[in-house]
Image (spheres, coloured by chain):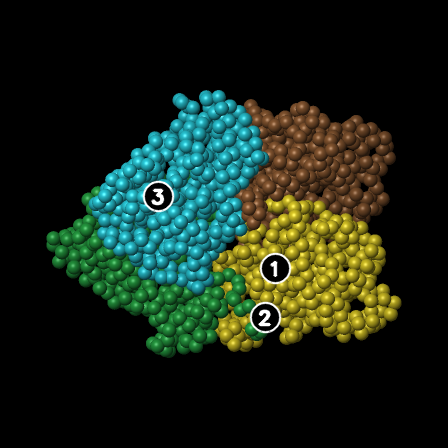
Chain colours: A cyan, B brown, C yellow, D green
């Protein structure tokens, strides 16, 4: 090809980062509208309906807040509203994000204990149970758990954590980050006894980044009244007082315009169908990865506990000594496919395929086939036939 | 899955009909704007720039008209502006669309002779040459030729038709329909000695359906002054008189808003790169089809003349006795992939994969992989490995 | 202001041309979506619903066609489908557009008689009746009438034309152009005995330019079978045969996407409310114009027959010797207000305020106030207080 | 009108709240695009260019942060990054928002002194100077000042505050909220010696609500290192460390897509032109209000210090005993005009006309005329002629 010829990839970018994720046209168009007075009755009704809808997705009847912030803001809100300097919390290690939340809590003056875990296998729940049963004085005020660890692609079985708490008759609050599982995988806030649920706009809700939501149980609301950490912007108490908006400052109406459409899409399809679709596409992804590594020399699934593999993101471990950077760069620059990289200690060692939100068979197959193409052009060793395996899985 | 669960396919539809074709977001957004007075200086400049740009794509310096109509309207414009009742024209058979144009000309009162052809092989140019050399009286006023026959996926070598005319010293006009090649494959109106070029908005220009363009040589403009067929809406003479707009009635400004962006995209990429991309993706498509039919029992390429296979659409012949309807229905309803069906006598016997306009590797691979998936679920016999062959082709 | 400072007007353009007209955001967004196969069941249902909806707007149960063309195309369709060379039709003069239609018919080989009229007063229906009663041989095949003459802002009382035909027991067809009244003013195709109704997309239907619709009575369909004018693209017979699409060539799906939303908007508001709103805004516009010319030296209403003044466009006559060009230029270039100019013999002598389609009180008042501002800055003599009069009218 | 007829206002809403404000189509469309990896080189370049552009608008060369939050979040960031529990700051009272910021600082554990002011006249700078000169021990760590008080429509002369600090040789930091002046009125962060500037996305930058920006001087960055208030999400230090993004958590790419277009629009027009346009439209607004209250019985300008009246918002004081609620409700529900209400103690006593951002003459005149219409229908006493006065002002 002539050097003067433009080689920038054309056509639609395939976006398979594990969040932010594809925003469907319907949602983009729903947000592409003039502003509205956030105190107008028309908007109040939109906001009310959105909050009710998110409760249905979270399967909760409790209090729900929306923050103009990313999920990290909602993390901070949870810590700042529930704890006082010197309080102790227990972080269940799952991977990069669990450690980030830990770092945040420590920075805000909270003592953090960690139940360590092998990132590829996931935490041993018995170790959580053990720690709780040891804590006779109930110094542990809360457990901070990431439901779906976006860095590793492993799911934490929250009902088992709940059982550990119940078995130990431990009053600690259970805080869960459902950022990358919300709207993609089953989540039952009330049935699972979650006290605080933290979600973001940019994953299964298929919205742009910039709004976070927090579900708060009555027990957590009660606990928040004793917290001594300073807060205003994220203060649940101040938000609660500002009815009907429950908002500090200007309400970001465009996120609600988008959320209204997002909820409509989720409920048109049916949450069970949404989850089944994610399971089907995730299984096909795993089939492809298994095929790539069939001879023991190609990429493999990072997660090693089959029943904890995430249905919204698959982390793929590169062969020893082969960086994931070259193939990701080829995928992006030559073929317009955006894959996720490795985070923290996994940088360069893995790549991540997001398969959450607005995705279907051809979108996924296009991603998997192009991943093969990128591996081929970047010289990554792999067994061909990944796409065939995925097709087989989907046809089954 | 529960019967009450919605099984309508989600996610973005893969649109691989051979036109209308994918409209890039940039173009949709460029058209998503308020109306403008079509006589305002700001619009006149937009229109002028668009017409100049289309001339660069057609590689012509001659007269260009835009019609508020589909390509069929521009077909009619060409016939109505050039001929008089009883005139004779020669249609070069290429497939369904060549016969439609013939039917139109006959309906408008023109005598049509046809150079017949095997649709799978394409016309024998020698037969065209022969007919021209026989026409000593120059009764044939024009040749009507479809450059890229969307129904069969074969290209007509226009320069060879030109040579046949020149060799016979025949004064007939050469009219060419470039609807499904424009902006996807090389086309040189002036260098190839084309007198009338007819294009549409909805293929390689990546716009919605509803605007057609017609390039007219000086010789054809001259010929049009003697035509006796009645016309007004499509009258080149009336259009020519209405400077600077060259338009009868209200100018459809939104198509020009889109066209402006379309031309920008084509020229940012570079026409040569655009054509190279189409060639690359078409070759990958053919590699996949060849793999599917490798054992002689699966689908095969409909076209049998390798150097005439189209770079914008591939027609795939189903195995004997297997209808293409079932797999197309599965593709659409289960997997949200829209493939083209067979036209006229090819209905049910072939399906067509459009690969024109706004397309890249993952879009095409997603289409090919899902086609395999649909064939599998619909019980169409085929050899697996089509996607692998396409990947191999693209990596080469 | 410093010379280097950009003085291009900012903010939203006020578009008060009498068509094309404001396209509401809802419609623009509805058209801002990917293409769809026009033969897919999903699209067939959209198209079916649109055609049914337009019939409700036209108040007709008869045959309806949609053309990929402007209104001029539908004019040509009506002439080409109904008449044969040498046939005679009667054009009711109303202004510029009636004469354009006449010119088209003549160009297509039809003999045209005209019932002349004073453009400011509108035609004397008695003269139409007189001509019909003279035509004992029924040589007049049809009456061509423009319901709402966009150039003059006068409405033609179609029921009175119908009565003239009935009184004369004349079998001529009644063809009506409702392009600039459709969706803005009451129109009853069947109750008024209209045989052919011609509408466009870009006025009261609030769509971009490029689609035209034609309602055809059974009597006109019958008559069309005898027509000898050549046609294909616009042939009702061919269209009728291509069920279910009733379309020649590729269907412009985006116009139907927009039309679907347009009909939804019209029916959400209710057609009677739509017409009442247009009446209210038109009356306010006229109040403003009357105030400007209160001293006999300023602009005045062009139309002189009060009960025929249009509710979709107001034509304003400039004071003797004052061109409308300067104030229109000031309005556009300094204040971003687009007003219509005079057409044909009215060029420079009038300007036109469109008040059709997507319009409300502040949009109209902004237009009227800015028109005052533009007249002031351009030195046009006028009595201030037009906006006050409009406010008074609207508050009444 | 029939009771069953829909009376919901149609057409485009006129949005004259003093923020959030009109979002131009260009910006909405720029944000209506697929997501992008916030670590991709393409996005990094967009973000870099945006930050550089905002610095040009703020006229600063210092450090700039963007937060995924509303302006209240950036307020909190400033407090949390600069102070320690028990520190004292001085709030210059300007109206509702200055007191909100005060409340926030107090809630976060800071001692706040207030220089009280008559909201209609604005603060007496001499009182600020006096307090500073008394503070020999330099207990006052910072002055918190709202540049343009959106509640009252008065501007605070920041350079005079700076002079007071300099005259007193007081080392206190100067924090300024430019939320409703940014991009509408002149602001010179560096020349005026501002240490922290807080802006939001939803006013003069014409974006949706949800992103805030903070400019920080080297002196303030230095001071932030000693702050003991806990923070993470809003921590400048942590943000600074995360180069090149300078962001905690997922970057809200869509705001940057919009900001890129916003900056383009501001710079195409030229900042000086933008400010001149705001001045011109504000003066016309004030002319209208003065006319309404000419007889002493109608609404009047709330602000009483002529050279401090804001060019982005005008607060209008209702006649004694007349609530602003009725006319605002009529404006919104009957005429689709959204006006701002009174905040805090001004609730019902004033209404506010926003004239910032994407506004031109017809938009403003439409607003003013409809305000008159709404006052008339709601029975508010006023002298007519406000629009005439505005036209006069604009024509001058």
Locate residue C44 relative to residue A69 in the image: left or right: right
Q: Residues within 10 Å of mark 3 (few under 14, many from 20)?
A: some
Chain containing the residue with disc 3: A
Residue D90 figure quarter: bottom left
Q: Which residue is mark 1?
A: C263
Q: Which residue is mark 2?
A: C276
Examine the rendered structure and indicate whether residue D29 appears above or below residue A303: below
Residue at mark 3 shares a chain with residue at mark 2: no
Examine the rendered structure and indicate whether residue A329 appears above or below residue D9: above
Locate residue A101 relative to residue C335 in the image: left or right: left
Q: Secondary structure at mark 1?
A: helix
Residue B153 figure quarter: top right
Chain containing the residue with disc 1: C
Q: Please tell me the numbered disc located at residue A20.
A: none
Q: Residue at x 55, y 44 (%)?
A: B1
Q: Please tell me the numbered disc located at residue A163.
A: 3
Q: Residue at x 81, y 59 (%)?
A: C222
**Considering only order in the chain, which callout, 2 or 1, is on the residue closer to the N terminus?**
1
Residue D341: where, in percent of width, then height?
A: 38, 66
Marks 1/2: CA–CA distance: 17 Å
């Amino acid at each position: 090809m002539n050097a003067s010829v433009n080689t920038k990839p054309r056509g639609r970018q395939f976006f398979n980062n594990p969040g932010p994720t594809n925003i469907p046209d319907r949602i983009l168009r729903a947000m592409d509208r003039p502003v509205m007075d956030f105190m107008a009755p028309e908007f109040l009704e939109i906001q009310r309906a959105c909050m009710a809808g998110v409760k249905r997705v979270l399967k909760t009847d409790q209090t729900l807040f929306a923050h103009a912030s990313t999920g990290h803001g909602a993390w901070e809100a949870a810590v700042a509203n529930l704890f006082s300097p010197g309080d102790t919390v227990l972080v269940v290690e799952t991977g990069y994000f669990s450690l980030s939340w830990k770092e945040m809590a420590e920075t805000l003056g909270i003592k953090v204990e960690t139940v360590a875990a092998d990132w590829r296998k996931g935490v041993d729940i018995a170790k959580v149970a053990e720690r709780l049963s040891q804590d006779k004085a109930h110094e542990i005020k809360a457990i901070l758990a990431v439901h779906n660890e976006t860095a590793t692609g492993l799911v934490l079985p929250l009902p088992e954590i709940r059982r550990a708490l119940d078995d130990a008759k431990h009053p600690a609050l259970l805080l869960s980050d459902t950022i990358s599982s919300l709207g993609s995988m089953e989540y039952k806030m009330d049935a699972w006894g979650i006290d605080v649920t933290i979600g973001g706009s940019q994953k299964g809700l298929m919205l742009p980044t910039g709004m976070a939501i927090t579900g708060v149980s009555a027990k957590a609301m009660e606990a928040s009244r004793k917290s001594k950490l300073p807060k205003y912007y994220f203060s649940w108490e101040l938000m609660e007082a500002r009815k009907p908006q429950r908002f500090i400052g200007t309400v970001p109406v465009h996120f609600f315009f988008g959320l209204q459409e997002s909820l409509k899409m989720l409920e048109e399809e049916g949450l069970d169908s949404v989850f089944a679709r994610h399971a089907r596409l995730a299984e096909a992804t795993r089939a492809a990865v298994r095929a790539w590594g069939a001879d023991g020399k190609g990429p493999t699934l990072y997660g090693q506990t089959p029943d904890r593999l995430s249905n919204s993101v698959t982390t793929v471990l590169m062969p020893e000594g082969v960086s994931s950077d070259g193939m990701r760069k080829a995928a992006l620059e030559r073929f317009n496919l955006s894959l996720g990289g490795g985070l923290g200690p996994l940088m360069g060692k893995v790549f991540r395929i997001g398969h959450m939100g607005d995705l279907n068979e051809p979108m996924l197959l296009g991603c998997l086939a192009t991943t093969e193409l990128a591996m081929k052009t970047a010289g990554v060793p792999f067994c061909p036939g990944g796409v065939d395996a995925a097709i087989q899985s989907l046809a089954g």
